[in-house]
Image (tube, grey):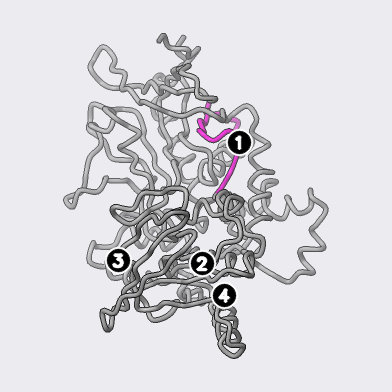
Amino acid sequence: MSPSYEHVRDLVGIGFGPSNLALAIALREHREQTGQALDAVFFERQPAFGWHRGMLLEDATMQVSFLKDLVTMRNPGSSFSFLHYLQDRGRLADFINHKTMFPSRLEFHDYLEWAAARFPHEVEYGSEVVAVRPVAGENGTVEYFDVVVRRGDGADELATTRTRNLVIAAGLEPVLPKGVVAGERVWHSNDLLHRLPGLTDPRRVIVVGAGQSAAETADHLHRTFPGAEVCAVFAKYGYTPADDSSFANRIFDPGAVEDYYAAPESVKRMLMDYHHSTNYSAVDLDLIDELYRRAYQEKVQGAERLRILNASRLVAVAEDGDGLRATVEFLPTGDRAELRADALVYATGYRPGDPLTLLGEAGEYCLRRPEGGLRVERDYRIATAPELSCGIYVQGATEHTHGLTSTLLSNTAVRAGEIVRSLAARRTAAPDTYALTP
């Protein structure tokens, strides 16, 4: 394989979800405002833009305000704002009349696609990064990375792009409990809409989990299959409401990132514990009330299809002919019951992708904190050994350093601007290094 680069890029972005899409916008607006262009390309392994397509449920709404779009918190006048999208789609007045701050997930996904479509030349879809190789100069300092990409359609065609900086935004990975293997009848909620067409006239479906995705999955299955029983299994006594109150929401403010980053480790842990319910294992109160109303009404009618198996856990699952046998334990007494089911959906959350799995040997230059996590600077650049002059930035794997907004949309626009400023400052500080290399 011979390198296919024609010159050295200023930046290679790995992944093209909302975070790196916001970065692409910030780069374009930086060029328009300053005249300074940073040469960037983004590689995305999906064949087209997509963001949690398996959970684009018809009635699901966003849990953040439309003002926390890709740009508004950084640049309210941007032509990439959600309001500009509405105007372009001819729905601005209709949305205002709707009197909501929270668009449907389907509409917000359409907004993201609308924005992504304006970068036909900056992003290469169907391109999976398979290796990152350090390139050392004559003095032994690593000045570049060679990013090896496999092109789409299952081909083994490899191409190499050389860059001075990386921005890794590989998104979130669905999490299954230890020992669980996904299959034809066992899914993660992330695949819900992709799997449902193969589920014909189910008698019973089990949903494991107590967060927003779990509640939405139980709700959707219950409405989609009127002849099926839906069993929601979780260890809590009930779904916990998400804390989206005004003061608590300050934990997602841009200024809170500054506070969190500077705080001692003990304060970081305290803040995370206090505000865990703003994001983790918590459900919108309206959805909780709807599920309770539905379950209660079915009790009144004597035909319970929505069964809330609270204070319980799934202890065993086995294939059984054309279905599953699941054993559920009621934790207060230890009593166990066996349920036959047609499918089992784990709504057990996500975790950020580990940047080191993508970096390979380049990861050897990354510095770690005493507890083992990556050292990440305030500008989202990983702290590296002195012999590496390239920049490695991460979006989404910085909760331990930057707080709760690490994997959320709330601070995406501001973070993208901070990364662009950091890249621009590094280029200004070392202009000779940035001369195009044949």
- As measured in the structure, the alpha-carbon distance from the residue carrying label 3 to the one carrying label 1 is 39 Å
Say which element carries label 2. Answer: strand
Q: Is 419 displayed left or right of 375 in the figure?
A: right
- As measured in the structure, the alpha-carbon distance from the residue carrying label 4 to the one carrying label 2 is 21 Å
- Amino acid type, label 2: Arg
Mark 2 vs mark 1: which is more N-terminal? Answer: 1
Residue at screen point 32% across, 46% down:
377
Say which element carries label 1. Answer: loop
Mark 4 vs mark 2: which is more N-terminal? Answer: 2
Q: Position of residue 264 (x, y in %)?
A: 24, 62
Labels 4, 3: front one: 3
- Amino acid type, label 3: Val
Q: Position of residue 187 (x, y in %)?
A: 46, 53
Say which element carries label 3. Answer: strand
Crowdedness of circle 1 by 10 Å Cα count: few (<14), some, many (20+)? Answer: some
Residue 172 shown in magenta: no
Q: Is residue 36 visible?
A: no
Asked if the residues shown at circle 2 and circle 1 are in contact, with their CB atoms under 8 angstroms apart, the answer is no
User: Which residue is label 2 attached to?
Assistant: 204
Residue at screen point 48% across, 70% down:
249
Mark 3 vs mark 1: which is more N-terminal? Answer: 1
Front position in the image: 23 or 29:
23
- Amino acid type, label 4: Leu
Q: Does 362 sit above or below residue 95?
A: above
- As measured in the structure, the alpha-carbon distance from the residue carrying label 4 to the one carrying label 1 is 31 Å
- Amino acid type, label 1: Ala
Labels 2, 3: front one: 2
